[in-house]
Image (tube, rainbow, N blue to C red):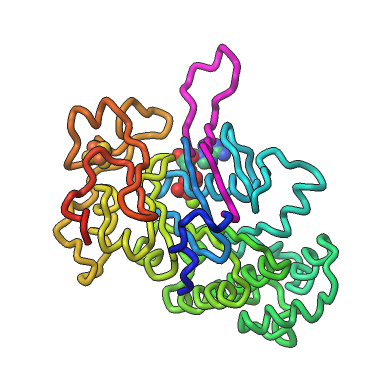
Amino acid sequence: MPDVARQHDGARQPLIEARGLHRWYGSGRSLLARRPPLRAVDGVDLVVYPGEIVGLIGESGCGKSTLGRLLVRLEAPTAGTIAFAGRDITHLRGRRLRALRRQIQVIFQNPFETFDPRYRLRQALYDPLRIHGLPDAERRIAEVMERAGLPVDRYLDRYPRELSGGQLQRAAIARAMLVEPRFVVADEPVSMLDVSVRAEVLNFLLDLRAQRQTAFLFITHDLALARHVCDRIAVMYLGRIVEEGPAELLTSAPRHPYTRALLASVPDPDAGTAASPALRGEPPSPAALGTGCRFAGRCPLASEACRRVEPVLEPAAPGHRVACHFPWEEQRTP
Ligand SMILES: Nc1ncnc2c1ncn2[C@@H]1O[C@H](COP(=O)(O)OP(=O)(O)O)[C@@H](O)[C@H]1O
Ligand code: SF4
Ligand SMILES: [Mg+2]
């Protein structure tokens, strides 16, 4: 795994830089609006460096997909900014936004929803090249399909339904990579696939990253998978990032009680977290957040102070940040 993630000395320019990102739903400005907004993303700072794979993990409903959609500009933030390669893209529209689409791609969970069932792969693959006016379509397609293990002479004229889920997800990744993006959001790219084909899809992604230095935001609810694939991991809880750090450090010496609880549910005896408290209960609704720490209702360490004051992300070690008033002290020195 390359070392890009470990270079947080400020010398490298981030590829993606989100600051104070919010996405609230149902927060119309009307004075008559009575219901509180649903705070899907509620103040996220996130940086992804070139060539880095950053894992975004957390339980279902914590805002991972919404954050992913914001970063690829499929959705507009309620507040906050997004910069790509140093340029503010928060409010890009029209031609400039279309041009950005070549640099930033997204891979969704369900490959059968990615492709129009009426068209053969040939058309699905040629379209993005035509839209972005890229030359050498045949060579590009043959090359990326070969890497995907889907040689064009056998697969290009097939319809999506004529491929298995694993093959089709590899085709979806191939299509995203055709335009040579610099940043890809992969939203649970293997969670719908049979366990037996997950490794080949993941290997294809890793292979592309090694070859092209593409950066990824790898969204998953599976911490074990994130540990395997990512350079760095950000843990999200109810719209906020609660812990963030190098994948190895975060999974071997987690500081936030939520991360520890997630790890405790990972069936890995080598993780050294067997004594951690398991995750209890359900998260509250993101439309009914009170004051203080959002995890307090489920946290074994919650105190009165936790219920009063919301913790913010603070450095715990180089490149490692935690939002907790009482991070696990025994992990302070590895
Ligand atoms: N378009 C939308 N309108 C209203 N609520 C939404 C919308 N999209 C997502 N949400 C809500 O935002 C929260 C975060 O959703 P999501 O980003 O899909 O979480 P995750 O990907 O972590 O499962 C959830 O409570 C979800 O119901
Ligand atoms: S701030 Fe308090 S309630 Fe929140 S995670 Fe830390 S110890 Fe638990
Ligand atoms: Mg999701």
Is 99 displayed left or right of 182 in the figure? right
Outermost residue, left direction? 275
Residue 302, percent across and down? 19, 36
Residue at 47%, 56% in the rendered image: 9
Quadrant of the image for the N terminus? Answer: bottom left
Q: Is residue 35 magenta?
A: yes
Q: Is residue 249 above or below residue 288?
A: below
Q: Is residue 166 magenta?
A: no
Count the numbered circles shown: 0
Quadrant of the image for the C terminus? Answer: bottom left
Toward which corner of the image does residue 126 lie, by quadrant? bottom right
Is 60 displayed left or right of 72 in the figure? left
Residue 69, percent across and down? 59, 48
Q: Is residue 151 above or below residue 206?
A: below
- Front-most of residues 185 and 110: 185
Examine the rendering and report whether any part of residue 64 can be seen. yes
Residue at 16%, 53% in the rendered image: 330
Residue 125, percent across and down? 75, 70
- Front-most of residues 181 and 204: 181
Residue 161, percent across and down? 64, 71
What range of the chain is rendered magenta?
14-41
Examine the rendering and report whether any part of residue 192 can be seen. no
Residue at 32%, 31% in the rendered image: 310
- Front-most of residues 119 and 284: 284
Residue at 22%, 53% in the rendered image: 332
Outermost residue, top direction? 31
Toward which corner of the image does residue 28 lie, by quadrant? top right
